Image (cartoon, rainbow, N blue to C red):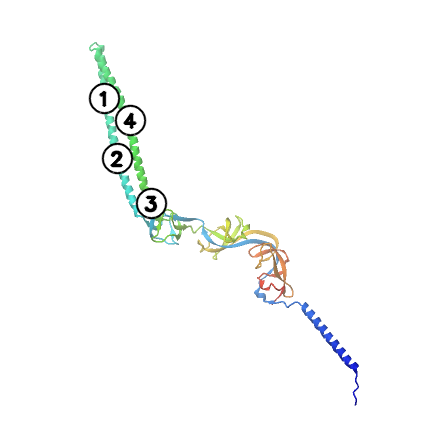
Amino acid sequence: MVDIARPDLAVARRHRRLILGAAALAALATVSVVVSRLRPAAPTVERQSVWIGTVQRGPMVREVRGAGTLVPEDLRWIPAVVDGRVERIRLHPGAPLTPDAIILDLSNPELEQRVRDTALQLRAAEAALANRRVELESALLAAQAAVAQCESDAREARLDADAEQQLHDKGLTSAMALRAKRTKADNLEARLTLERQRLEMQRRVLASQLAIHEAEVDRQRATLQLTQAQRDALHVRAGVAGVLQQIAVELGARVGPGTNLARVVDPTRLKAELRVAETQARDVQIGQRATIDTRNGVMPGRVARIDPAATGGTVTVDVVLDGALPRGARPDLSIDGTIELERLADVVYVGRPAVGEEGATVQLFRLDASGHAVRVAVTLGRVSVTAVEIRAGLSPGDQVILSDMSQWDEVDRIRLK
């Protein structure tokens, strides 16, 4: 049997192979294009692991929050009045105080000696005053005696002159004798006038001389009272009623005048001292309402003072408390405070997301009906402690994820399970 060559069949087989290869390549290209255009599968996130908020429309209260402490409104530092050494500490922080309560004792031997020396100087001044008074009173008595003698002599001389005048009128004595009697009486009266002037001058000298010594006695007495008061100040007293909060010196320490020894507070009059972030403190105003949480109760209050300077990124705000203090309230107690800035009547708002400040545009995941969350751009408005105004990007009723989703920055869609 002889094979017959058929070249047309070989050509047909080559054509068929080429067609099949081209078709396979076209199919492969088509599949590649389709696959490249498919979106990647959305990552899955546990619903319970995220915080979901619902956009609402209505009133919103703007608030700011700050941590702080309770501090006394009435605080008094007790300073040292004189030099001394801390000899004894009688009371310790927390002790209730009366104005006369002695907190600690100081010692100063030099002051004790000064008190004794001043007492002796006062006694010497008093003795000098008494001695000078005796001298001046003796001189005054002598002057009074001289006046009395002159009065007696002048009166006798005048009577003698009058008698001589009667005798002269009867012609029983001479004119010369009468003139002599009258001259003697006039001289004694003139002397009496001088003695009276001398007596008056003696009285004035007595007052002025005694005034000098009395002033010295007063000076020495005042000096003694001052040194005694300084000695008494070695027993450091509270001066006011309250509670001893701090002893600022140690036993045996040497202190000088003006050194703060102890701090006394009134525990019934406290205020809140809050530290508010400086970025949030710009809207805080004096008189705004506030609430203070002491962990044992919540107290209302109002803003009374705003520190003009920021420290460490915070601004100190003082809040005066209204009403009775809760149990356990005491100075330096840690607290949390919330200040009400304003009440917005009708705004679109949602719970405050983990990121974003006032006026910023942030990316949030909005939930859809299919159980997925799609990234949308949201413009924020005014912020509060737990809520934020929505200016664009969301509508009332929308649900968004408020948790920190920074780990999903590379995707625009996630699936909640």
Which amino acid lies under the numbered mark 2 shown in the image of this protein?
Ala
Secondary structure state at the residue bearing disc 2: helix
Q: Do the residues bearing badges 2 and 4 touch, measured as CB atoms within 8 Å?
A: no
Tell me the crowding category of disc 4: few under 14, some 14 to 19, or many 20 or more residues within 10 angstroms, Cα based: few
The crowding category of the residue bearing disc 1, from other C-alpha atoms within 10 Å (few below 14, some 14 to 19, many at least 20), is some
Of callouts 2 and 3, the N-terminal one: 2
Residue at mark 2 to residue at mark 3: CA–CA distance: 29 Å
Q: From the image, state whether disc 2 or disc 3 is nearer to you.
A: 3
**Label 1 to label 2, Cα distance in Å?**
33 Å
Q: Is residue 200 above or below residue 8?
A: above
Residue 103 visible? The answer is: no
Instruction: Name the residue located 27 percent from the left edge and 39 percent from the top edge.
Output: 123
Residue 230 marker: 3
Of discs 1 and 4, which sits in the foreground?
A: 4
- Residue beneath disc 4: 201
* Mark nearer the viewer, 1 or 3: 3
Q: Position of residue 358 (x, y in %)?
A: 58, 54
User: Relative to residue 297, is residue 110 drawn left or right?
Assistant: left
Q: Earlier in the sequence, mark 4 or mark 3?
A: 4
Q: Which residue is mark 2?
A: 130
Q: Amino acid at mark 3?
A: Gln
Question: Which residue extends farthest top?
Answer: 171
Q: Specify the quadrant of the image occupied by residue 417.
A: bottom right
